[in-house]
Amino acid sequence: MADVAGFPVAARPEDLGFDSARLGRLDDYMAGMVAAGRVAGVSTLILRHGKVVAHRTHGSAVLGGIAPLTTDAVFRIYSMTKPIAAVAMMMLFEEGRWTLDDPVSKFIPEFAELKVFTGVGPDGAMLVEDARRPPTMREVMSHTAGFAYGLFPDFHPLEKAYLAERIARPEGVQAFVDRVAAQPLMFQPGSEWFYSVASGILGVIVSRISGQSFGEFLKQRIFDPLGMVDTGFATQDHNVDRLVTFYQDDGAGGLREVTEVLGAPINSFTRPPEFEDGGGGLVSTISDYARFTQMILNRGELDGVRILAPVTVELMGTNVIPDAVLATSHPLRLLPFNPAFGFGLGFSVMKDPRRLGSVEGRGTLAWGGMGGTWFWIDPENDLVFVGLIQRLADPISGEFRAKARTFTYAALTRPEL
């Protein structure tokens, strides 16, 4: 039996509870999106019970290309870096190097005197007040600390400031820390949720605690042990030619190549970056990322290599957004968090999917990336899905994620297997 990413391939999807004909809807949709010019190529992988249900590629690495997209194509995974940064932090948590209630300033003293945004004055300057307390590590890991990002400059004055200061695209670690420290928090720590540079902060903390660069830590402690041979902050000599081209909507129904991200020229990913960003700096392949997600599904272990203890993975998959926040809605939140859908330590957490009209299993962990990549980890159905495209996040890339879930679970006709 052939292997994919080191996992055995089922003889038939039916052997793992899937209906082949229904699963064909997923392939038809992906192939159709390529044919319509919505993406250059797409790669999908479904694992169940540690075996490959289906692994498909459609299209090419280049829009309109003749050569088929290879199964080992290298993608910019952007924010799918965040769960990896969270795992790195939790490895140090298990070593007793930090606790969830530690103030972030314990590890980044530059954050000791953070202010909090309260509004904009008549002169256009931001008004601030003192933070009632420093953000805790729990809040940093769950995007409830109050930091901003710069992804949504028309959304909030602080988002505009983060973009103007290139906080997410700094010239090095200290520049990143100093620029974050110079800005106020968006809200008092723990009082709201906002997608932020928090995972970049985690990478800094991992480096300061371990004494290694963030990239060295990830390679030594996660990538090499899990056999993630093509994952890193830059391509390597053996895989540079496998990096797929990155596109965005051209405004006329087609695509154009991305040349700028967050107000700066796109990172080529062919050389080491100035800042190893825990929030969005990695490239990877579908095989590598499947190994990471299967490790999480296996509660911290893969092929005899233990990365985390089961209880630590359980902690990561437990919602930590305060109940008072979940009980309300707020435009800052960007995602519809509520008592049925929360966020843990590095992942979104589906607490009650049927209540939300969603089809995945209870406890599903998920996230995605700015390049259109996405994944989910479903412990109730013992299932992992990884999908990779290279289209700058927009409603179309969101459609890929929604359709993939619909077609995958519509094909899971025997969940009891």
Image (cartoon, rainbow, N blue to C red):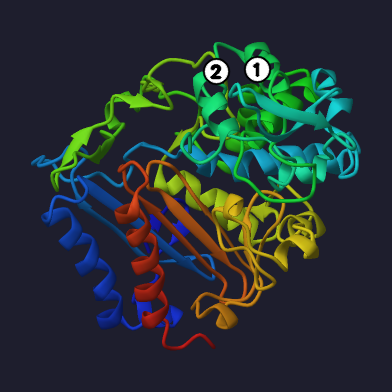
Q: What element does badge 1 sit on?
A: helix
Image position of 395 (left or right of 339): left
**What residue does disc 2 label?**
165
Residue 204, image x, y percentages? 70, 24
Of the residues shown, which amino acid type is indicated by label 1?
A: Arg
Of the residues shown, which amino acid type is indicated by label 2?
A: Glu
Q: Earlier in the sequence, mark 2 or mark 1?
A: 2
- Quarter residue 341 falls in: bottom right
Q: Are marks 2 and 1 in contact (CB under 8 Å)?
A: yes
Image position of 214 (left or right of 10): right
| Image quarter in which the N terminus is found | bottom left
Residue 144, image x, y percentages? 73, 46
Residue 212, image x, y percentages? 72, 19
- The numbered dot on residue 179 is 1
Image position of 80 (left or right of 42): right
Along the viewing direction, whichever of 3 and 387 lies nearer the viewer: 387
